[in-house]
Image (cartoon, rainbow, N blue to C red):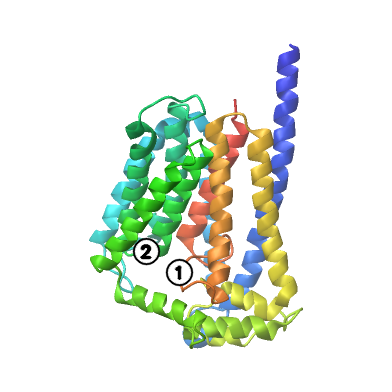
Amino acid sequence: MGKQEGSGVETRNRVLNFKGVLYFLSILLVFGLIILYSASYIMVYRWPGIDFSYYFTRQVLNIVIGLVFMFVIAIIPIDKHLQWAPAYLVGLILLLVAVFFFPAKSGTHRWIDLGFYDLQPSELAKFVIILFLASYFDKRQFQENWKVDFFDKFLIPVGWILFISFLVFREPDLSTSVIILSIGFLLMFVAGLRYYYFFLLAGLAVLALVAVFQFELLKPYQLDRLRGFLDFFKGSTVDTQVQIGIDAISSGGVLGGGLALGDYKYLLPVQFTDFIFAILGEELGFVGMAFLLILYYLMARSLIHVAIKGINRPAGKLIVVGYAYLVLIQVIINVGVVLGVFPPTGIPLPFISYGGSSMLAYLGGFGLVISAVTHDE
C-alpha cells in the first residue's frame, strides 16, 4: 500500500513538473500567432484577393489540427508507440518516397498535395526517427551492461539514420537531412554508445562530405548558398534576403518600432516563414527577441529536467531529450540564418513560423512527450 501511495505522489510530482512545459508551449503558440499576424497581414497588398487575416486564420487552423493530433498521440500509452515504432518508420519511408510522384514545387519534391493540405513528410521524419531509435534501444536494453556485437549495436541504427537522411536529402532538403543525422547520432550517445564510436561517425561524415562533392550531389542553388555563406566570413556581400533580415533587426533597437509598424516585411519575399525572427526583431526589438529565446530555453530546460528527474524508463528519457534537442537546434539554425551566421536553409522557427506540416509535427512530437511522461512505468 505504501508503495502505491509513493508511486501516486511520484506521478503527481511528475505531472506538476510537466505543467511548466505546457505553460511555455501555450505562450509560444499565442506569441507566435501575434507575430505571424503582424508579419503576414501585408500580403493583401501583394495579392489583393486575399483577406488581411488569411494567413493568421490558416495558422489557427494549423494549430487546431496539430492540437488534435497531439491529444490523440498523448492518450495512447508510450508502450504502444514504442511497439508500433517500426510500422511508423515504414509509413514514413512510404511518404518520403511518395513525394517524388507529386509535381515539384520551387524545384523540390518535399510535399504531398492532399488537396486541402500540403503534407511535408520530412518534418514528420525528425520525430519518427526519435521514436524509432528510442524503441530500438529500449528493446535491446541499450545500457552500460548491454553486451552485443558491433553489427547490432552500431551499424543497424546508423544504417536506418543514414537511409532516412538520404531520402530527405534527395528531395532535396539538405538542412533537414543534416538535422536528422544529428538527432540520430545524439540519441545513440545519450543511449549509452561508447565515446570511441564517435571517431567512426566522424569518419563516415567525412566520407559522406567527400561523396557529396565528388559526385556533385548538391543542387546549384545549394552550392550558391554555401558560397554566399563563405563570402560572409570574407567580408563580401551576403545574400540579399539575409542582409534585409540583418537590417530589420538592427533597425529595431532595444524596444522595436511597434507591432505591425515594421517596414522591412515589405522587402522580404516570404517574411512570415523562415525570416519571421527578423520581423520580430524590427517590431519588438532586443526585448522581444530575448523574450522569445528565453521561452525556448526555459521550455527545453524544463523538458530536460522532466527527463532526468521525472521519467524512469530509458526510452521515455530519449524521447523527451530528443524533442528538447530538436527544438533548440532548429531555433539556433533559424536565428543563425537570419543573423547571417549560417547559410539560408529553409528551417522554420518552431511554433512561430507559418506552416501546417511543421506545426503538425511539433505538436505531434509534443504528444509523444506527454505520453512518455504520463504513461511512465
* Image point (37%, 55%), residue name: 205
Q: Are marks 1 and 2 in contact (CB under 8 Å)?
A: yes
Image coordinates of residue 229 in percent, x first then y, are 46, 77
Residue 259 seen anywhere in this rendered image of the structure: no
* Image point (30%, 62%), residue name: 210
Image coordinates of residue 222 in percent, x first then y, are 36, 73
Image coordinates of residue 123 in percent, x first then y, are 43, 56
Badge 1 crowding class, 10 Å Cα cut-off, few under 14, some 14 to 19, many 20 or more, is some
In the image, 74: left or right of 30? left
Look at label 1 and name its amino acid. Answer: Gly
The foreground one among 103 and 245 is 245
Look at label 2 and name its amino acid. Answer: Asp
In the image, 96: left or right of 360? left
Image coordinates of residue 261 in percent, x first then y, are 68, 85
As helix, strand or loop, the secondary structure at mark 1 comes to loop
* Image point (42%, 30%), residue name: 83
Tell which circle, 1 or 2, labels the residue nearer the N-terminal end.
Answer: 2
The quadrant of the rendering that contains the N terminus is top right
The quadrant of the rendering that contains the C terminus is top right
- The single residue placed furthest to the top in the displayed view is 1
* Image point (61%, 86%), residue name: 247
In the image, 253: left or right of 240? right
As helix, strand or loop, the secondary structure at mark 2 comes to loop
List the residue tagged with mark 1.
346
List the residue tagged with mark 2.
173
The foreground one among 81 and 315 is 315
Q: Is residue 120 above or below residue 193?
A: below
CA distance for labels 1 and 2: 9 Å
Badge 2 crowding class, 10 Å Cα cut-off, few under 14, some 14 to 19, many 20 or more, is many
Q: Is residue 314 above or below residue 271?
A: above
Residue 365 seen anywhere in this rendered image of the structure: yes
